[in-house]
Amino acid sequence: QVQLVESGGGLVQAGGSLRLSCAASERTFSSYVNGWFRQAPGKEREFVARIWSGERTYYAESVKGRFTISRDNAKNTVYLQMNSLKSEDTAIYYCAAVRIPVRSFSTTFVDYWGQGTQVTVSS
């Protein structure tokens, strides 16, 4: 059972930055695709970004150019650097891991979730 623990959320003004961290309880990078989802009040959980072998990355259009996903193999930690934050980025952010081979990096196929961390962007 892999445990994912997020940290780094908080309150920030529009235009500001935050960095989220997701620490895994064991080495997952070779066997999983790691990423982030978010859920705003009254909305469904949505994909934000993912990272997989060869440090390949993919982003939702709404965050492309503002968010950067990365990972540190030695620390078993995935990061989400969020810049130029907007009020519409306000949500609970969840770290996720999907076992390889990946049919789809979507909520349906996530094997492990973190507990979530709140990000609030004030305008």
Image (spheres, helix red, strand yellow):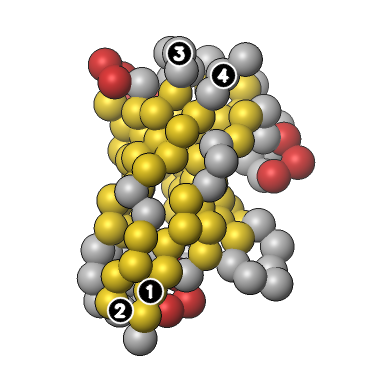
* Amino acid at pointer 4: Val
- State the count of labels: 4
Q: CA distance from mark 3 to mark 2?
A: 35 Å
Left or right side of 66 for 120: right
Tell me whether the residue at label 3 lies in contact with that at label 2, contact meaning CB atoms closer than 8 angstroms. Answer: no
The 10 Å Cα crowd at callout 3, few under 14, some 14 to 19, many 20 or more, is: few
In terms of image quadrants, where is residue 38?
bottom right
The tag on residue 108 is none
Q: Are marks 3 and 4 in contact (CB under 8 Å)?
A: yes
Q: Earlier in the sequence, mark 3 or mark 4?
A: 4
Q: Please name the residue that numbered disc 4 is placed on.
A: 2
Which type of secondary structure does the marked residue at label 2 adopt? loop
Image vertical order of residue 116 relative to residue 70, above or below: below
- Classed neighbour count for the residue bearing mark 2: other residues with Cα under 10 Å, few (<14), some (14–19), many (≥20): some
4 left or right, relative to 74:
right
> Residue 97: x and y, percent?
56, 30
Q: CA distance from mark 4 to mark 2?
A: 34 Å
Q: Considering only order in the chain, which callout, 2 or 4, is on the residue closer to the N terminus?
A: 4
Q: Which residue is mark 1?
A: 121
N-terminal-most mark, 1 or 2:
2
Report crowding for label 1: few under 14, some 14 to 19, many 20 or more residues within 10 A (C-alpha): many
Give the amino acid at mark 3: Glu
Q: Secondary structure at mark 1?
A: strand
First of labels 3, 2 by sequence position: 2
Which residue corresponds to mark 2?
14
**In contact (CB < 8 Å): disc 1 and disc 4:** no
In contact (CB < 8 Å): disc 1 and disc 2: yes
